[in-house]
Image: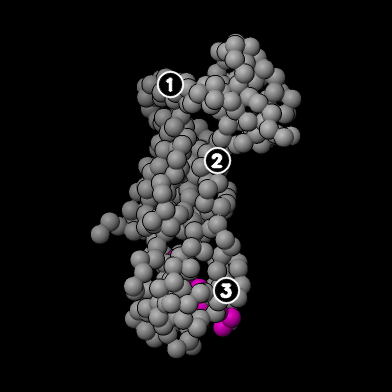
């Protein structure tokens, strides 16, 4: 069986269809379908089936796609065994991070990797709903993702925990709570909240804070860009939850720690199992992990 066709089948499964897989693999949908047809003839059993106007993997296709992961890992380990005899790993490593994570981590990572000869870093910001981060690993080597700290672990990918970032209550500088050392959810019962869209991690935390206060949250705005939230809070248009390490130095707002609720987010690096075997990718991951330890030393 052809390793490229196996990778194509695997990508159809992880991306949910031929068109999405074709975009990730930089192929036409027709080329993807042709590769699957060749693979299906070799396998001797149907690997895909029509569902409405779409296509999904059959149980046999899912089993073969799972086996394709082991093939990809084995090939990467073979390449890594050869690379181990080189003086240093070289190559291009693609890294993505959600927007505030990019602000927190990418400048320092670029500086660190810039000191390493032979490694080119290509960075982008990718902020998606929580359940969609793992699928990004089909086209990005290292995906920096975030989730509420009580959320289940990511499935189908290698997970490397980076840090926990506390979330504090962001209030205007002249707000009555701005001088407090900490606030309790009961202090926020009548607050006007600026939250992120549903499906993104902090939205669930705002709901939890409100539940502890005994009242439903009064969401007046939903904005996903934290810098816009910072500006709105600073101008007195509501309060919010913002990450401490990213916005602790803001001159426009005051961050007040929240007591009674363990509010924070987990920041993880997600890698496909095969790409986690590449020496050059592991070298960049090591720099990312070291940077995270500097930002949030273990306590």
Residue under label 2: 135
Give percent across and percent down for residue 243. Answer: 45, 65
Element assignment for label 2? helix
Give percent across and percent down for residue 9. Answer: 59, 25
Relative to residue 209, is residue 131 drawn left or right? right
Q: Which mark is residue 219?
A: 3
Q: Nearer the viewer, residue 89 or 15?
A: 15
Which image quadrant: the C terminus?
A: bottom left
Q: Which mark is residue 74?
A: 1
Residue extent of the magenta highlight: 236-243
Q: Nearer the viewer, residue 107 or 240?
A: 240
Give the alpha-carbon distance from disc 3 to disc 1, as whole Å.
50 Å
Give the alpha-carbon distance from disc 2 to disc 3, as whole Å.
30 Å
Residue 198 against residue 189 in the figure, above or below: above
Element assignment for label 1? helix
Coloured how?
A: one colour
Q: Residue 185, located in which quarter of the rendered image?
A: bottom left
Who comes first in sequence, dot 2 or dot 1? 1
Who comes first in sequence, dot 2 or dot 3? 2
Q: Residue at x 55, y 40 (%)?
A: 135
Q: Nearer the viewer, mark 2 or mark 3?
A: 3
Q: Residues within 10 Å of mark 2 (few under 14, many from 20)?
A: some
Give percent across and percent down for residue 206. Answer: 48, 69
Q: Residue at x 56, y 28 (%)?
A: 10
Who comes first in sequence, dot 3 or dot 1? 1
Give percent across and percent down for residue 137. Answer: 52, 39
Residue 242 against residue 175 in the figure, above or below: above
Give the alpha-carbon distance from disc 2 to disc 1, as whole Å.
21 Å
Q: Which mark is residue 37?
A: none
């Amino acid at each position: 069986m052809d390793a490229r066709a196996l990778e194509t089948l695997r990508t159809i499964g992880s991306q949910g269809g031929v068109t999405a897989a074709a975009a990730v693999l930089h192929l036409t949908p027709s080329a993807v379908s042709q590769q699957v047809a060749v693979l299906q003839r070799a396998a001797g059993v149907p690997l895909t089936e029509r569902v409405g106007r779409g296509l999904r993997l059959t149980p046999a296709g899912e089993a073969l796609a799972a086996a394709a992961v082991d093939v990809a890992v084995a090939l990467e380990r073979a390449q890594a065994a050869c690379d181990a005899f080189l003086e240093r790993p070289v190559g291009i490593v693609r890294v993505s991070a959600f927007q505030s994570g990019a602000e927190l981590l990418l400048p320092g990572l670029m500086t660190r990797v810039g000191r390493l000869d032979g490694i080119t870093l290509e960075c982008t910001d990718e902020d998606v709903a929580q359940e969609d981060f793992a699928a990004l690993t089909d086209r990005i080597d290292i995906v920096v993702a975030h989730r509420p700290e009580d959320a289940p672990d990511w499935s189908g990918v290698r997970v490397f925990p980076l840090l926990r970032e506390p979330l504090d209550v962001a209030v205007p500088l002249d707000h009555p709570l701005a001088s407090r050392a900490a606030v309790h959810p009961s202090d926020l019962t009548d607050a006007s909240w600026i939250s992120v869209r549903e499906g993104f991690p902090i939205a669930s935390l705002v709901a939890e804070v409100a539940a502890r206060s005994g009242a439903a949250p009064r969401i007046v705005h939903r904005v996903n860009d934290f810098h816009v939230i910072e500006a709105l809070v600073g101008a007195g248009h509501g309060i919010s939850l913002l990450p401490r390490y990213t916005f602790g130095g803001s001159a426009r707002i005051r961050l007040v720690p929240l007591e009674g609720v363990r509010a924070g987010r987990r920041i993880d690096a997600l890698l496909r199992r095969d790409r986690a075997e590449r020496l050059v990718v592991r070298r960049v991951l090591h720099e990312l992990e070291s940077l995270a330890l500097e930002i949030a030393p273990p306590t």
